[in-house]
Image (tube, rainbow, N blue to C red):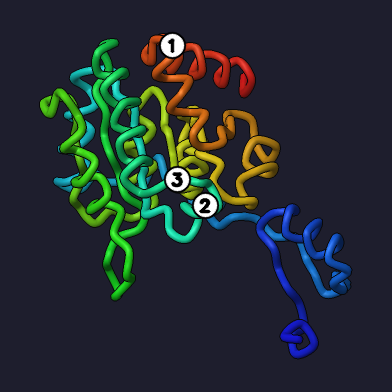
Amino acid sequence: MFLAATSALILRETVSRDLMTAAQIDTRKVEQGVDTAWLVERRHDEFVASYAVQHWLDVTARRKTVAITLRDLEPFDKRLGTTQQAYEQAFAQVVNRLIADGYQVLALSTCTSIDRYNRDDRMVALRMAKYVNDSENFHIAMDELNDVEIGKILASCVLTIGTRLHSAIISMNFGTPAIAINYEHKIRRDYAAARPGGIGHRYPSLAERFITKRGGRYAQSIALRLKAKSG
């Protein structure tokens, strides 16, 4: 087994250790780490906004903004009993409800095709856009942004709904409440427990809640509840 050849196995959450224990796998070399998103510094003094960042800060200043991150669900789609198209359509319904209730929505991406990575979340956002009714209030950041730049933009939003756990954690680090879509075990426990300001929702319950309730009011109540929790 590969653990025999390692000095340590560092996990960013505790669920994997629990699964190893349940499977009777030796955990003596396991050490507890954290998601690197918790290490992103806010850099209040030295940060200078680039043209792209300033553009999005200007956009979010015009209207209350909810930020979202999307992804290709594969290979989790089969375990969730859904399809990529169904996920995109459900998320579009969330976006439509938020816009109808007075918000604008900004899609940001923490995973792009830079450095030959074979996934690009911006393409998911572009596909989803065809299901959005009001394109004027749905924006997609196509820029290559680093974590600090994304954090600065998220700080100007009222809420982040992140399929990418990384984005939800960065959002909380920069002071904006966040909801993480719970599509895999690593999100299940540690996201909400590690720091105030986070709620995990299992997909597809998130879309159902936004669709069956008034999405804007639900988003606002979530944001207020998270701020009270962190305050």
Q: Residue under label 1, please give it.
A: 213
Q: Residue under label 2, please give it.
A: 37
Q: Marks 3 and 2: which is nearer the front?
A: 3
Q: Earlier in the sequence, mark 1 or mark 2?
A: 2
Residue at position x 58%, y 29% in the image: 197
Residue 6 x/y as whole percent: 74, 85
Q: Marks 1 and 2: which is nearer the front?
A: 1
Quarter of the image for the N terminus: give it: bottom right
The amino acid marked with disc number 2 is Ala
The amino acid marked with disc number 1 is Lys
Q: For residue 69, which quarter of the picture?
A: top left
Q: Residue under label 3, please give it.
A: 82
Residue at position x 36%, y 35% in the image: 154
Quarter of the image for the C terminus: give it: top right
Q: Marks 1 and 3: which is nearer the front?
A: 3
Please say if 87 is above or below 21.
above
Q: CA distance from mark 1 to mark 2?
A: 31 Å
Q: Are marks 1 and 2 in contact (CB under 8 Å)?
A: no
The amino acid marked with disc number 3 is Thr
Q: Secondary structure at mark 2?
A: helix
In the displayed structure image, the side of residue 5 where residue 87 appears, left or right: left
Residue at position x 27%, y 50% in the image: 124
In the displayed structure image, the side of residue 140 where residue 110 appears, left or right: right
